[in-house]
Amino acid sequence: MKNILFALVLIVGIVAVSFHAENKEKSDPVIASKAVTQVAVIVKDIDKARNAWAELLGVEVPQVSIAESHFSRPTLYKGNPSDAKAKLAFFSMGNLQIELIQPLGGKSTWQDYMDTYGEGIHHMAFAVKDIDGIEKRFEMQGNPTIQRGGWDGGAYSYIDASNNLGCILELLENYR
Amino acid sequence: MKNILFALVLIVGIVAVSFHAENKEKSDPVIASKAVTQVAVIVKDIDKARNAWAELLGVEVPQVSIAESHFSRPTLYKGNPSDAKAKLAFFSMGNLQIELIQPLGGKSTWQDYMDTYGEGIHHMAFAVKDIDGIEKRFEMQGNPTIQRGGWDGGAYSYIDASNNLGCILELLENYR
């Protein structure tokens, strides 16, 4: 009787620990957000592209801004400083942003993509908290950071997840 | 005095017609929806990819379905019948679907993409009404339909908008 009771307690204990481990794994994913915040298209000519997209969607033609290294988080490409620049234009859709990116030279994942594939969809983005910690978790799983940088108010990191997820992801953290 | 009045009426008339024309254009875009409903990634091995994405997002591994020609709208690739197939898996995010596509041969835009670029983001999709009419509007603007087909309950068309918008778009019409 004592042995049966002991066995029962042991089984209950094992089941409880297993459940805990499983739940812990499920509740701590690398990407906690359940929303894609941005889809980005590399284009050769941002003026032609932003006009065509605006006409397609029936919206105003968005302004162009310049992405470049910012003192708050200087641009690194494969770990080395980069003076890469790009022209950007954003369309605010109901559920996310469509971003157009025209690479302007310098070493970047934008220029890489253009040189290798031409125009096309470069990444989808997720909003995150603790961007540096999440970068590390990706890296430990074989998904290196290909480029990182920041702007006045935020930080971005491009994760080359092509080996495991089939594409590049962007992490975005806003500090405002 | 009469001439000045006539000129004034004429100017007001021209301005009114211009406004009307501009508003009409703005209110009749090719894509009326302001939401991207899907982002799709071409992958080599859907089992590896769906497990990796499920772990990334902390969700259940989704089932795999097969895309193939359906009598309701037989698959056409560049206007010709195609027996192309693909394995599909879908992740329901808060604001859209992430679709994984493993091409299984036959002539398709999926196989084209894999053969040309390898893995990567193939398209973003918009929900539409009157898919055939919208295909025609795209075609008239120099964006041909590269592939079309259907399934039990819906229709899809891939628009090769790479010359004007920098990427492939998918139109999706659900009949249920």
Image (cartoon, coloured by chain):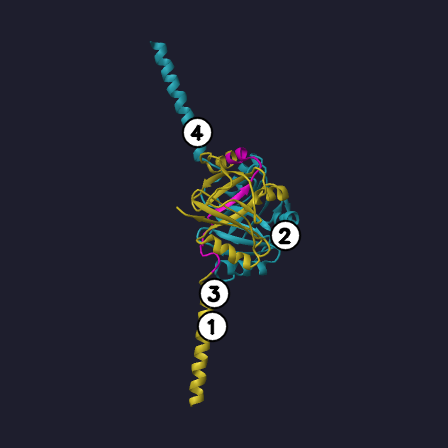
Chain colours: A yellow, B cyan
User: What residue is disc 2 on?
Assistant: B84
In the picture, the disc for residue B22 is 4
Q: Please say if the residues under marks 3 and 4 sit with CB atoms less than 8 Å apart.
A: no
Q: Which residues are magenta?
A: A29-50
Q: CA distance from mark 1 to mark 2?
A: 43 Å
Nearest to the eye among marks 4 and 1: give it: 1
Relative vertical location of residue B4 with respect to residue B91 in this rendering, above or below: above
Q: CA distance from mark 4 to mark 1?
A: 64 Å
User: What residue is disc 3 on?
Assistant: A25
**Three-letter amino acid code of the residue under disc 3:** Glu
| Residues at marks 4 and 2 on the same chain | yes
- Residue at image position (60%, 44%) is A112
Q: CA distance from mark 3 to mark 1?
A: 11 Å
**Three-letter amino acid code of the residue under disc 1:** Ser
Q: In the picture provided, is B107 more to the left or to the right than A73? A: right
Residue A43 lies within the magenta run: yes
How many C-alpha atoms fall within 10 Å of the one at disc 2: few (<14), some, or many (≥20)?
many
Q: Secondary structure at mark 3?
A: helix
Evaluate whether residue A107 shows in this view: yes
Classify the position of the N terminus of chain B by image quarter.
Answer: top left
In the picture, the disc for residue A18 is 1
Q: CA distance from mark 3 to mark 4?
A: 54 Å
Please state the horizontal and vertical placement of residue A142, each as a whole percent of the image: 57, 58
**Three-letter amino acid code of the residue under disc 2:** Ala
Looking at marks 4 and 2 on the same chain, the residue that comes earlier in the sequence is marked by 4
In the picture, the disc for residue B141 is none
Please state the horizontal and vertical placement of residue A96, each as a whole percent of the image: 45, 46
Q: Check the residue under mark 3 and report the chain it is in.
A: A
Q: Please say if the residues under marks 3 and 1 sit with CB atoms less than 8 Å apart.
A: no
Relative vertical location of residue B164 with respect to residue B63 in this rendering, above or below: above
Nearest to the eye among marks 4 and 2: give it: 4
Q: Secondary structure at mark 1?
A: helix
